[in-house]
Structure formats: C-alpha cells, structure tokens
Amino acid sequence: MTEFRIKEHPILAVEAKKGVPFTWQGRPLAARSGETLASALFAHGIRVFGHHHKDGAAQGLFCANGQCAQCLVLADGSPVKSCMELVRPGMRVEPVDALPALPAVGAAPRMDGIEEIAVRVLIVGGGPAGLSAAVELGKLGVDTLLVDDKHRLGGKLVLQTHRFFGSQDTVYAGTRGIDIATKLEAEVRSFPSVRIWLQSAALAVYADRKVGILKEGRRYVLVRPEILLSTSGAREKTLAFRGNTLPGVYGAGAFQTLVNRDLVRPTEKLFIVGGGNVGLIAGYHALQAGIAVVGLVEVLPECGGYKVHKDKLARMGVPIWTSHTVVSANGRESVESVTIARVNERFEPQPGSERSFACDTVLIAVGLDPVDEFHHKALEFGLSAFAAGDAEEIAEASAAIFSGKIRGLEVARGLGREAGPVSPDWYRTAEILKSRPGKTVPEEYPAEETGVLPVLHCVQEIPCDPCTTACPRSLIQIASDDIRALPAFVCDPDGKGCSGCEKCVTICPGLAITLVDYRKDAAFPTVTIPYEFLKEGVKPGDRVWVTDTEAAPLGEVEVVQVKAVKANDRTVLVKVKAPRAIAKKIAGIRVQEAEASVPLEGWVRRMEDDTVICRCERVTAGEIRALIRAGSRDVNEIKSVTRACMGPCGAKTCTPLIRRLFREEGVPDAEVVDQLKRPLFLEVPLGTFAGAGGEGD
Ligand code: FES
Ligand code: FES
C-alpha cells in the first residue's frame, strides 16, 4: 500500500519506528509509534475524516493543534480530535458522518474526587516563551508547574527546520528551531523545582482563581497558582472564500506539523495564501520535503514577511503573486485546484484576472491570533497574571524566547524572589526582536574583484546579526548597536582580508550570503552558495540555473564542488564556477522547474452556496449578513439564531470572520457586542469534572 511518508530529509533525521496497527473503516493500517491519528491517516492518503451532519460537507484537518475540532473521528466508538490523539495498537477508527452517538456505558463509571494542588507559578504552554520563562524560574528554584497539551515540549520550535534570526548571544540566532527546542527542554528538565505535565490541556480559569487542567488527557486537576503565566502561543487565522472548508485547505502550522514533526508527505502540489513569514517559511519547508509549491499569493502589494525569506523562496523557483488573492478552492470532496485573481486597491478581485492551478492543498497563512483567553480570564478574576510570547503579542519565535526570559524574571520578582531588576537593555532587545521589517535599500555589490570576499545579499533591516559574530576576523560588522541595521563587509586594517572560511555563508538564516573566490581564476571565479536540500540533489559536473537575489535568472553554470560537512550543521555548500560578470550577483540555485506553476486552461468557477463562515456549524456568510442587514449588532443574537459560534471550536475560528463581516457591512467594531466568553476554552467529556478518568469510565 502506498504510504505518503518522507523517506529522507535534508535537515530532519528519519528514524525507523515501530509500526502500530489500527483500522480505518475496518481496513488494517499501520501508524508509527508516537504518531497522532491525523498524521497516520494522512500517511495513508486519507484526508477526508467525515461529513458534516448539517449539510454533508466533507471534513478534514485544519489546525492540527487541537483548536478547531474539524478533524474529529471516532476512535473505538468515542469522538476524538485526531490531531491530538495518539494511535494505540488495535484502535478502531471510523469517520464521523453524523453527530456522534454517546458511547454505551456498561456500568456506572467510577467517580473520584478532584485533585487540587497549589503551585507558586503555573505556566500554560511549553513553547519558546514558556520554556525560557521556566528556565529563569528554575534557576531561582521557584516552584513551577509547566503544562502543555502536546506530547513533547517546544511548541512551534519543533516545526522549524530553519536557522533562527536575532542575535547569537540572546536567542540562539543561527541555530535551527528544532535544535533550540532540544536545548531549552534539556535546560528546563535540569531544574528540580520545575514540574512538567505533557498532554495536559488547560481548560479554563475560574472565578475562584483555580485553573482546570486535564492532566495527561485523563485526570481533571484543579491548580491554584499564585501567578499564572500564559505562554499558550497563537492560533492561525482563517479566511472566508468559496471552498474554504474543503479538506485540503488548512493552516500553514498544520502543514509544518505533518511534514516537519511527523514526517508525513501530506501533499504533492501545494498552493500558499499569505506572504508573511509563516507562509514563506512553509513554502521553503515544502520544497525541502520534495513537495512542489505551485505558487503563493499575497493580497498586499508587498509580502509582509522578511525579504530574505521571500527572496529565498522565489530563487528556488516559486512564483509569488502580490496584490492577488484566493477566489476559491475547488473540488468535490477535497481540493483539486485553486482559483486566484488580482485585486484592486480595495482588495477586491478583478474580474477577468482569474487563473486556476491544479493543486491538492491550499495553505492558509494569513496571520495569527494570540491564544490569550487564559490571561484575560485570570485578570478578570483577580489572579496575578502575566503573558509572554505570542499569547502576549504576535512576533517571531526569537522574540518569544526573549519575552519568556523577561517574564520569568518578572514573575520571580512578583513572588518576592531575589531576581534582581530586569535590565532596561533587555526590554530594548525584546522590542527590537519584535519589530517588523524596516527599510529596504537597493542591492549594491562590492567593487573588489580580487582575492576572496563575501557578498551580502541582505538589503532589508531585520533583527539579525549572526554573520557578525561568525566571522573570525570580525570583517562583517553592523555600524550600530541596533542589530536591525544592515551588516557590511569591511576592509581589514591589517590587510589580511577575508580568508574564505565560509562561516558567514553557513550561518546566515536568510541564506543571503555567498562567497566569491577570484584566487584561482579571476575570469571564472568560484561562488559558494548555501543549499539546504538533499546533497544528492546536486553533484559536481551538474549544470544548475543560478539567480540573483530576487530570482532573476542569471544563467546556467557548472557545479565544481558539493561540500557537506558536519561542522556546517546540515547546510550544504555548493560551489559553482561562474563568469566574472555574474559571479557577485549570484544568490541562489533554482530547485523547482517552472512547469510546477503552469496555470490550467481557463479558470475553475466554484458555484457553491455562499462561503462558510462558521465551519463547525456550517453557517454561511449569507445567513449572518442577512441578520446584520436586518439590524443585528449583537453576536449573541446571531449565535442564537444561526448557531454560529456554537461549535466545538468554541468560536475560535469564526469570531474573526464574523467581525470582518460586520466591517464589510459598514458596522464599526465599537457598535458590535461580542459574544459572552465563558469557560471552558476546550471541550472535554462531562465526566471529567466528576473525576471520571480511568479506562472505560
Ligand atoms: S485539526 Fe484537530 S483540532 Fe483543529
Ligand atoms: S467555527 Fe467553530 S464555532 Fe464557529
């Protein structure tokens, strides 16, 4: 049987794992040990997990993060979120094709008392911010409980195969996210005062200042913290367009979870919506996994992500269409194609500009919303509360690492520990790490054409400086104490110049430094290019297409060496011989052929009912718009009439879309009454609150 798994990866180790037998609709299949049901199903090409009880629409994965409940399946008769549930041997898995029936109860379940514990600090979320905070609290011996709903610590870090930005001395810049997760986890686990509960979801903060935790997915525990630190990260925003709920339309984070965490190959042809860092990086990760990226659309005239990420993706051969949007995802049971169109200055699709492309997956990467409900409820109920990372403000993971560190010290001080004041420099660094990309300057090439020298194709101000610390001769410098300023190669006063050590080429997270060596042949210098794909993909003697920084083709050149050494931490250095006239302009090698992005003939119209806004309850924009037009300004009213917001995701998915509908109808935010938000923030079996948790309860 065909399995859709990644067999080799340029960055991630592919380990042999024990098979875990389970069945899908009676068909015997095998998962890998420690794998979630959703990943195991995807690995067997199963993407439709059921059909909605209201209109029979096909349902599948969306967030892969336990937030949306789109991935519901029946496991041994009970409905579970397949993206969170690990496969157990012999599990019988079925699609949810109607409202699931309650499981049969043989005997009265055993009800135990509810355990209640007190801790000084409760950290909700074991991602970059939570781990960094726990390290600071651990160093001071503060009694801390860190809970995370996943099976391993690290949050989004474990999905990041690329090197991080920022600076080396504060946030591990130049190190890959996956490796930062390992380092932080090891450090946190070395502190006896920090307890860790994995697979333990925080459910709610109550008026009596207790926090309900479903410990290890089974036991309900009430935790009484003196301070609650929310580091619960972010959830992905969704977008309203025709076909937006088809299986195959899902979040970029979900994609990275399948590909980078579980080494599943969920798609052959991918289309990306959103040119922020998340979308750009997801495209790069897809190419690393051997998946074709048909294209990326960004509705703004410029991508919002770092230019180095955008340039990198474009150089690899992925078309990026700015001022374009997705019109529809097309297909009957799952995505078969996508239709895009150019937009005008009001972001309206322009008739006549539509194009369709064959693809099986549309990634939505249109931004993130903070998971901040725990923090807000804690503040409302008078519990001392702090937030860090994306739960406080959406920014890069490097910023989350640093804000967690700061918040850890602030929490310790809040408890009266001798933590010392947080240096004002730290707050400044935190602000710098959070900052959006600054100005972009035209690229200038060095005048010299002798010896060996690096060419910095880095022309946008972003918080990043590992090249300056990597150069053993300190010849790459930033002329400011602000790491957002652009780095430059400076002449050495001793006249020693660049030695060609390649350290800067290897460490640059944006793959934006090349090395041009004129020493052996000034007419045909050697250009060293960083390459993060399988080293077997290119070999000496091959001819490869090279491009300039922004993907303009420069010509075909010969590969003279492929250097894959341990010290370079999985970054392969490809050396090409190029004519002097183009050598300094070369910034990358194209890895994807243009055929991957050829549009279909004509364009696919998706003539479905109106766009679905509340995917849990299948409520369309038309139904909600009609109420707004009839004068409704209260989301509670819309909720009672249509059932929008009443689904298992707890309105996390549709709330921003409903707000947008109000805005589209000319109703200002201030006039809209938000729906009441009551605990719980996550659905659990009712018996949980009566202490039922044992096998079969
Ligand atoms: S896809 Fe599983 S909860 Fe969202
Ligand atoms: S989308 Fe889940 S409640 Fe509306």
Image (cartoon, rainbow, N blue to C red):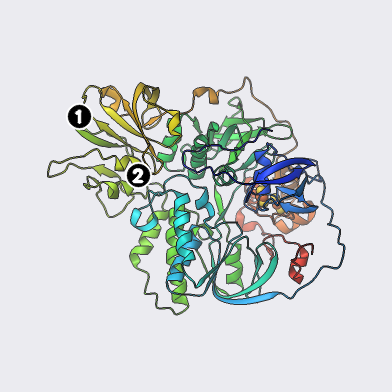
Q: Identify the residue at horizontal 56%, vertical 56% (top origin).
A: 152
Asked if the residue at label 1 sits under 8 Å from ligand 1, the reply is no
User: Disc 2 designates what residue?
Assistant: 567
Q: Is 448 above or below relative to 462?
A: above
Q: Residues within 10 Å of mark 1 (few under 14, many from 20)?
A: some
User: Disc 1 designates what residue?
Assistant: 519
- State the image quarter where residue 354 is shown: top right
Residue 270 on image: x %, y %: 58, 34
Q: Identify the residue at horizontal 75%, vertical 37% (top origin).
A: 609
Asked if the residue at label 2 sits under 8 Å from ligand 1, the reply is no
Image quarter where the N terminus lies is top right
Image quarter where the C terminus lies is bottom right
Q: Is residue 502 visible?
A: yes
Residue 279 on image: x %, y %: 52, 41
Q: Secondary structure at mark 1?
A: loop
Q: Residues within 10 Å of mark 2 (few under 14, many from 20)?
A: few
616 or 242, which is in the foreground?
Answer: 616
119 or 574, which is in the foreground?
Answer: 574
